[in-house]
Image (spheres, helix red, strand yellow):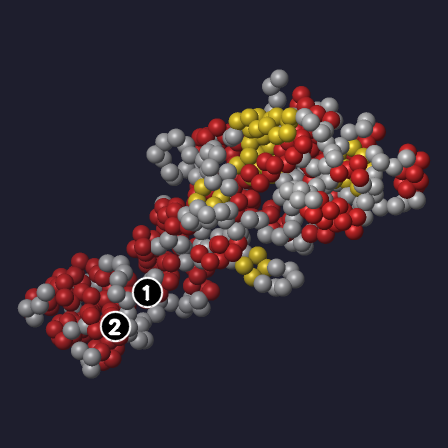
Amino acid sequence: MNREVRVRFAPSPTGALHIGGVRTALYNYLFAKQQGGKFLIRIEDTDQTRFVPGAENYIFEALEWLGLTPDESPLHGGPHSPYRQSERKPMYREYAQRLVDEGKAYYAFDTAEELDEMRKRLTAAKVKSPQYNAITRMQMKNSLTLPADEVQERLDSGEPYVIRIKMPRKEEIRLHDIVRGWVMVHSSTLDDKVLMKSDGMPTYHLANVVDDHLMQITHVIRGEEWLPSAPLHVLLYQYLGWEATMPQFAHLPLILKPDGNGKLSKRDADQHGFPIFPLAWTEPESGTAVAGYREEGYLPEALTNFLAFLGWNPGTTQELFTLSELVETFSLERIGKSGTKFDIKKAHWFNQQYLRNKTNEELLAYLRADLSRAKLEGHTLNDTQLLQICELMKERATFPQDILAEGRFFFEAPTSFDTGLVAKKWTAAAAEVIQAYSQALNTGQPATWEAEAIKQLLHDTVEAKQAKLGQIMPALRIALTGAGAGPDLMILQELLGKEAVSQRLSFALQQLSVQA
């Protein structure tokens, strides 16, 4: 039966959104749009003890920044409201009770101390994986081992309990994963997971199955870490009679550390000097601020392009894709099984490409904001000149802020000079030519202050001093910018203006005369 494709991204509001979660959201979005379907966001906040204020708003802001706008969500509404699990609490109880009534789940009254004692006993008996399962449950305090009247009495008295699934003892559970093919797990390796907690809230396992069914989710696209839970979810679909409409699964490969040795973590990102979150985040309790890709200068279109390639490939040599092009090209079948290394240098490359493709007018907005932050709004350059600076600097930039960081000399004259650079590039011969060039400027040359005329005057001065232009240019750059590299010196001088150039040359000649 053909159904409208419906996928969901279901984060928990327990902190900032990890970059791996962003990739999961991206793949869900791309698949839904490619199939002409719907992309939902559902907030899975069943664990109220881990709720972090501000986390939900952070999630939506991050996804909006990347252009991943949902069709249905707590903020956008939809026919299956509410989209926060904490607001759907009453309905979960109904399904948990149904499983108990049908003998597919049971009440468990074990205390934390009794559970701990059970695990210690199994560990002492050299059981590899101590767990509450088809064997151990018969030695515990639950509705399978207690008389029915005692169970009812405990329930009536309000004694705390949980509801656990009754895992079959000897059954093979099969599921087909779009990425990994057939997955088979024997039920003897699985434990009787809690479905309903003592506070009346469902666990992720029950809530996500119930919600996916009620929200008519057709494909569950999530991280590899959820693969061990998939057999339990398949069993729940079977127990609840929903196997015929069970969604298809696609478990995404891990994002690995840069060296490929294990899953990428925040600590790894910190050690390698790159963000792990899409936006900056401040921990509510500690006040610790953590960097984000947006604040570091990554463009949203570059980041989505980069993330798309962390596990998927188009099957061609094309690397640059707009979001709409990714939608057109994306397929779950081209997602690999193996983990993929997180290469921040590749992220830099993507950012460079998208930065260079931006218009100078777009870059000017970034430059103006950076000038304001640096308190450099008092410059004398007009918009035409600022646009020229954007054009000159964008080929040398990785991030928008590099335009000012690498081109600050357009707005501020150097006040000191790197001694090592001066020792290499500033010579007596160069100083003599620059002195003559400076004097020529003071006599009114060239007649027009344009790059070609400036170039001709410099060539004439170098020739008159019988010097070589290649030996003069590095010293001239130091005098004008204080740097060892940068954009075309003739265009640079045209932008600075004759007066500023003359002042900078005089200052450099005065400061560096001793070293020369």
The residue sitting at 44% across, 67% down in the picture is 374
Q: Is residue 71 visible?
A: no
Q: Where residue 217 sits in the image (x, y, percent)?
A: 64, 30
Quarter residue 208 falls in: top right
Which quadrant is the N terminus positioned in?
Answer: top right
Q: Residue at position x 64%, y 60% from top?
A: 284
* 120 displayed left or right of 464: right
The label on residue 420 is 2
Which of marks 1 and 2 precedes in the sequence? Answer: 1
The residue wearing badge 1 is 410
Q: Residues within 10 Å of mark 2 (few under 14, many from 20)?
A: few
Q: Secondary structure at mark 1?
A: helix
Measured along the vertical axis of the image, is residue 468 above or below residue 93? below
Q: Secondary structure at mark 2?
A: helix
Residue 306 lies left or right of residue 78; in this view the side is left
Amino acid found under the numbered disc labelled 1: Phe
Instruction: Judge by depth and name the residue closer to the eye, 138 or 83.
Output: 138
Which one is closest to the eye, mark 2 or mark 1? 2
Give the x, y percent position of residue 18.
55, 49
Q: Could you tell me the amino acid type at mark 2?
A: Gly
Residue at the far top in the pictured view: 1
Describe residue 376's horizontal placement relative to residue 179 as left or right.
left
Q: Are marks 2 and 1 in contact (CB under 8 Å)?
A: no
Q: Residue at x 53, y 54 (%)?
A: 266
Residue furthest to the front? 125
Vertical comparison of 91 with 396: above or below: above
